[in-house]
Image: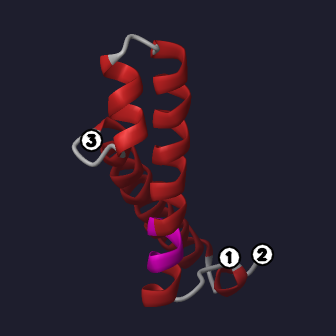
Amino acid sequence: MNWNQIFHRLQQRGQNWLQQTASDLQLLVDTSQLNRRTRTAWRQGRTIRASYLLADHQRRRITRRREIRRLVEGRTSCRGIGF
């Protein structure tokens, strides 16, 4: 495997990583699916509690999405690059 092939594969993996990161950031911005406890805390002015619940909710959504992505696409690793 020459350096050009290695560079191309690294570039592909970098692009894939950026796309996954961008989709995760979109999830963080999307608040349409907030759970009931978060909305209630926000309405009652308990912003610290609401922020904590929001962060936990988004973390679980991102984790769930990664698990689904792994099941659908399979695991990816750097083994095929030659490192």
Coordinates of residue 8 in the picture (x, y in percent): 47, 70
Q: Which residue is mark 2?
A: 83
Residue at numbered disc 1: 78
User: What x and y, as percent, mark residue 36?
Assistant: 35, 43
Q: Give the Cα distance between marks 1 and 2.
A: 7 Å
- Nearer to us in this view, 25 or 14: 25
Secondary structure state at the residue bearing disc 2: loop
Count residues near mark 2 (Cα–Cα under 10 Å), then give few for <14, some for 14-19, many for 20+. few
Q: Which label lies toward us, 1 or 3? A: 3
Circle 3 crowding by C-alpha within 10 Å: few under 14, some 14–19, many from 20: few
- Quick one: SS at disc 1? loop
Q: Quadrant of the N terminus?
A: bottom right
Disc 3 marks a residue whose amino acid type is Asp
Per the image, label 3 sits on a secondary structure element best described as loop
Q: Please tell me whether residue 44 is drawn above or below residue 62 in the rendered image.
A: above
The residue closer to the viewer here, 79 or 38, is 38
In the picture, measured across the screen, residue 21 lies left or right of residue 43, that is right
How far is mark 3 from mark 2, CA to CA? 38 Å
- In-front residue for pair 9/74: 74
In terms of depth relative to the viewer, which is nearer, 41 or 52?
A: 41
* Residue sitting farthest toward the top: 45
Left or right of 80? Residue 14 is left
- Point out residue 17 in the picture as x, y percentages from the top left corner: 48, 59
Quadrant of image for the C terminus: bottom right
Q: Which picture quadrant has residue 78?
A: bottom right
- The amino acid on which the numbered mark 1 sits, given as a three-letter code, is Cys
